[in-house]
Image (cartoon, rainbow, N blue to C red):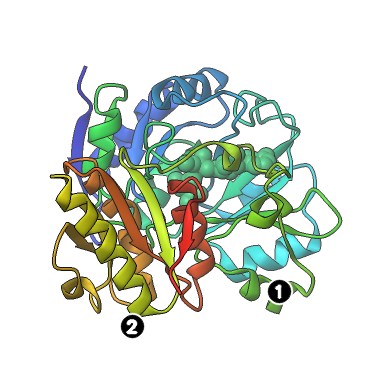
């Protein structure tokens, strides 16, 4: 059966539709919904069968734990066995918002939801539609990103329809998301807080508040023999169908090198895809050029990354070349996703 698509706006949330969506979740069904980061694929987090359904719909390995979404602060204490002071401080500062915290789980949370782990990932999203849905569903919604496992995360309802339209009960269409990169994950199960996935809330922002915070060793490319601690970060992810390579270096050198690749492909009767910015798009005379956003507005780059990667799956290109985006605040998160999409293929042009 095809999922029902229901349009909704944050400034008018239809109570009848939300109630219906909440009921689907309470009865063990699956509803995709917008959050400020990416669209989530929701199921009742306390129902092991719902979690199994989520894994099946996404084609996701069931050892890859789900994030439990809450919409009221006091719900946190019911699903974790301990809240360290530092986690409390981050919750006060960043919730609701794009932050997920890993904490020791309470018995109430089934192991199916946590991929067999004794810890649970918890997030309180700021999106109003998400909040109303979570409340209508009883308070605890397990939700990974609403994409087929391995594909770029969805930033529009159309992306969810494309991947999961046949596998779930309802899709709430709240338009394009604001951030476009999944939440920052901070792990509190060790002595020192560790970032398992960089996001809109940067390492520096966390360090400013908590002092010592580390980046998971498995995320640093130089140490690629170390496994990332978040099970999901070890999988191939976000990859477009065509081979993607990142070209880094000064602007002129990058443009020169990409144009060379484009010209070589053209000689062989083929076309490359190029991920450029508003500032550089016109400097690529051949190939299929897509601007990801403006370097003057790094949030625009974060917001469009997954969409651009998806768009290239509908283009006939033999390879894709992307500029690098080491932007000041969220560059860490953007490059983390882009490098994964490229299978860590990066060339220096300078
Ligand atoms: O922004 C987001 O976080 C979105 C929206 C929907 O909230 N959700 C999302 O979920 O990105 P997902 O499942 O695509 O990514 C969750 C990541 C995975 O890499 C998973 O392995 C990790 O979090 N994770 C979840 N629980 C964990 C745990 N107990 N310990 C370590 N890593 C965990
Ligand atoms: Mg995901």
Query: Is the C-beta separation of discs 2 and 1 under 8 Å?
Result: no
Q: In the image, residue 219 lies at what x, y percent?
A: 64, 53
Q: Which residue in the structure is indicated by mark 1?
A: 207
Which residue is situated farthest in the bottom direction here?
296
User: How packed is label 1: few (under 14 Cα within 10 Å), some, or many (20 or more)?
Assistant: few
Residue 165, visible in the rendered structure: yes
The answer to whether residue 96 is left or right of residue 228 is left
The answer to whether residue 117 is left or right of residue 112 is right
Between 86 and 296, the residue placed more toward the observer is: 296
Q: Is residue 283 above or below residue 198?
A: below
The answer to whether residue 30 is left or right of residue 336 is left
Residue 139, visible in the rendered structure: no
The label shown at residue 343 is: none
**Residue lying at 72% horizontally and 31% vertically, measured from the top left:** 117
Q: Is residue 240 above or below residue 90?
A: above
- Between label 2 and label 1, give the one nearer the viewer: 2
Q: Is residue 161 above or below residue 93?
A: above
Q: Is residue 323 above or below residue 74?
A: below
**Residue lying at 35% horizontally and 26% vertically, measured from the top left:** 24
**Element marked by disc 2:** loop
Mark 1 CB near ligand 1 (8 Å cut) = no
User: How packed is label 2: few (under 14 Cα within 10 Å), some, or many (20 or more)?
Assistant: few
Of mark 2 and mark 1, the one earlier in the sequence is 1
Measure how far apart labels 2 and 1 are at the Cα level: 25 Å
Q: Which residue in the structure is indicated by mark 2?
A: 296
Q: In the image, residue 65 lies at what x, y percent?
A: 60, 33
Between 183 and 12, the residue placed more toward the observer is: 183
Q: Quadrant of residue 211?
A: bottom right
Between 131 and 68, the residue placed more toward the observer is: 68
């Amino acid at each position: 059966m095809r999922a029902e698509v229901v349009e909704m706006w944050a400034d008018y949330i239809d109570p009848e539709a939300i109630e219906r969506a909440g009921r689907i979740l309470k009865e063990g069904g699956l509803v995709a919904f917008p959050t400020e980061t990416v669209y989530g694929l929701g199921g009742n987090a306390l129902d092991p069968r719902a979690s199994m359904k989520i894994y099946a719909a996404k084609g996701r390995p069931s050892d890859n734990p789900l994030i439990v979404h809450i919409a009221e602060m006091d719900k946190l204490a019911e699903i974790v066995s301990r809240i360290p002071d530092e986690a409390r401080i981050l919750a006060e500062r960043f919730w609701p918002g794009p932050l997920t915290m890993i904490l020791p789980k309470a018995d109430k949370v089934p192991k199916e939801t946590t991929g067999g782990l004794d810890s649970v990932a918890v997030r309180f999203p700021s999106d109003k539609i998400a909040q109303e849905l979570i409340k209508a569903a009883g308070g605890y919604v397990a939700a990974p990103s609403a994409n087929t496992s391995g594909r770029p995360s969805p930033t529009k309802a159309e992306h969810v329809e494309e991947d999961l339209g046949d596998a779930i009960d309802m899709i709430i269409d709240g338009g394009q998301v604001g951030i476009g990169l999944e939440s920052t994950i901070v792990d509190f199960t060790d002595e020192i807080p560790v970032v398992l996935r960089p996001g809109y809330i940067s390492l520096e922002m966390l360090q400013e508040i908590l002092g010592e915070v580390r980046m998971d060793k498995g995320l640093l490319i130089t140490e690629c023999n170390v496994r990332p601690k978040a099970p999901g970060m070890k999988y191939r992810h976000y990859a477009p169908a065509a081979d993607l390579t990142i070209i880094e270096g000064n602007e002129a050198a990058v443009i020169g090198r990409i144009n060379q690749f484009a010209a070589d492909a053209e000689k062989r009767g083929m076309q490359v895809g190029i991920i450029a910015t508003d500032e550089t798009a016109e400097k690529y005379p051949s190939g299929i050029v897509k601007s990801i956003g403006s370097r003057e507005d790094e949030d625009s780059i974060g917001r469009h990354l997954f969409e651009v990667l998806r768009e290239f799956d509908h283009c006939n290109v033999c390879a894709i070349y992307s500029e690098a985006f080491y932007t000041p605040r969220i560059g860490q998160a953007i490059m983390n996703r882009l490098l994964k999409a490229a299978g860590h293929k990066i060339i220096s042009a300078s």
